[in-house]
Amino acid sequence: MDLIKNEYQVILERKSEKAEGSYTAYLFEQGIDKILKKVGEECTETVIAAKNSDKSETVYEITDLIYHILVMMAYQGITPEDIEDELRKRAEKRSNLKKFHQVDKNS
């Protein structure tokens, strides 16, 4: 998770610096619609690479997807710690499949 946090910090720096020629700064300038479009594109490219069973291409596309998700998170004020907190909550629910999927035989 340290690499994710480090990348997130770089993204925040680029957001505040608004450096000319920075792709990250460009995304922030364009706004949430552009950022979400890129998230969608990268998601689709990840699915296609995985469907083609191309490991190196899938890893490449996952990395692009993570980057664009981090940009989206930064735009919306969502931190890696917010994600970690949610993952911890979900970890507490593991092995509770029966509890969440009980069938009410009376209905």
Image (tube, rainbow, N blue to C red):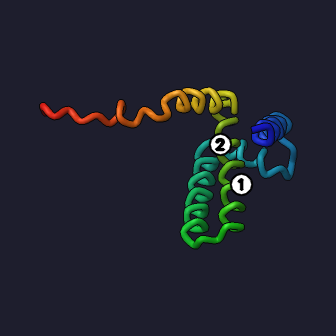
Q: Which residue is mark 1?
A: 63
Which of the 4 image quarters holds residue 49? bottom right
| Residue 56 appears in the picture as rendered | yes
Measured as percent of width and height from the top left, residue 47 is found at 55, 62
Q: Is residue 27 left or right of residue 48?
A: right
Measured as percent of width and height from the top left, residue 27 is found at 71, 47
Measured as percent of width and height from the top left, residue 100 is found at 36, 32
| Residue 15 appears in the picture as rendered | no
Q: Which residue is mark 2?
A: 31
Which residue is painted at 40% across and 36% down in the image? 97
Which of the 4 image quarters holds residue 89? top right
Q: Is residue 97 left or right of residue 67?
A: left
Going by the numbered disc 2, the residue's amino acid type is: Gly
* Residue placed furthest toward the left: 106
Q: In the image, is residue 83 above or below residue 59?
A: above
Q: In the image, is residue 100 above or below residue 50?
A: above
Q: CA distance from mark 1 to mark 2?
A: 21 Å
Going by the numbered disc 1, the residue's amino acid type is: Thr
For label 1, the crowd category at 10 Å Cα-Cα, with few meaning under 14, some 14 to 19 and many 20 or more, is some
Which residue is painted at 74% across and 38% down in the image? 1
Which residue is painted at 75% across and 41% down in the image? 4
The mark nearer the N terminus, 1 or 2, is 2
Residue 97 vs residue 85, the one in the foreground: 97
Query: Helix, strand or loop at disc 2?
Result: loop
For label 2, the crowd category at 10 Å Cα-Cα, with few meaning under 14, some 14 to 19 and many 20 or more, is few
